[in-house]
Amino acid sequence: MKRKRILFVIAALLIVTSAGIYFYYGFLFKEARHIESEMPDFSIEAAKLLKDYDSDPKKADLVYLNKTIEITGIVTKKTDSVIVLENTVFCLFTQKIKDIPKNKKVTVKGKCIGYDELFQEVKLDQCTINKQNN
């Protein structure tokens, strides 16, 4: 009788542990996205993206938020790891960027993380330069 109880408890523990591991890796744990290797969901001009957010922020969030998007515009500000396109789209890079002069037209791919009402900018992170135009 005791032996059956011990086997039952061990089997129950194995089932509960297996279910816990399945739940954690199947639903809770998500690997980080690699935006650089993803295809963009949208390709859009910087001015158009800001216009969409200005006209209806909730609708724009439904369309763009957490999506991989490709933005084209002229670089108006630049630091080591940030460029701003058309004074409206803030692009944060994962590493230092160089050889991107101001007033140059570029296409940037990144993940849209929303609209900053204080600075009136659309924010992108995990950005990469897709191409530099003349």
Image (cartoon, grey):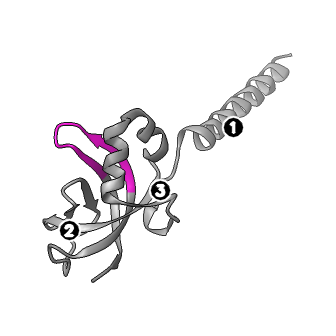
Residue shown at 63% from the left, 36% from the top: 23
Disc 1 or 3, which lies upstream in sequence?
1
| 19 relative to 68 in the view: left or right | right
**Mark 3, mark 2: which one is toward the viewer?**
2
The C terminus - image quarter: bottom left
Q: Amino acid at mark 2?
A: Val
Q: CA distance from mark 1 to mark 3?
A: 26 Å
Q: Amino acid at mark 3?
A: Arg
Residue ID for mark 3: 33
Q: Amino acid at mark 1?
A: Ser
Image vertical order of residue 93 relative to residue 3, above or below = below
| 80 relative to 108 in the view: left or right | left
Q: Secondary structure at mark 1?
A: helix
Q: Which residues are magenta?
A: 111-123
Residue ID for mark 1: 18
Residue ID for mark 2: 75
Q: CA distance from mark 3 to mark 2?
A: 26 Å
Disc 1 or 2, which lies upstream in sequence?
1
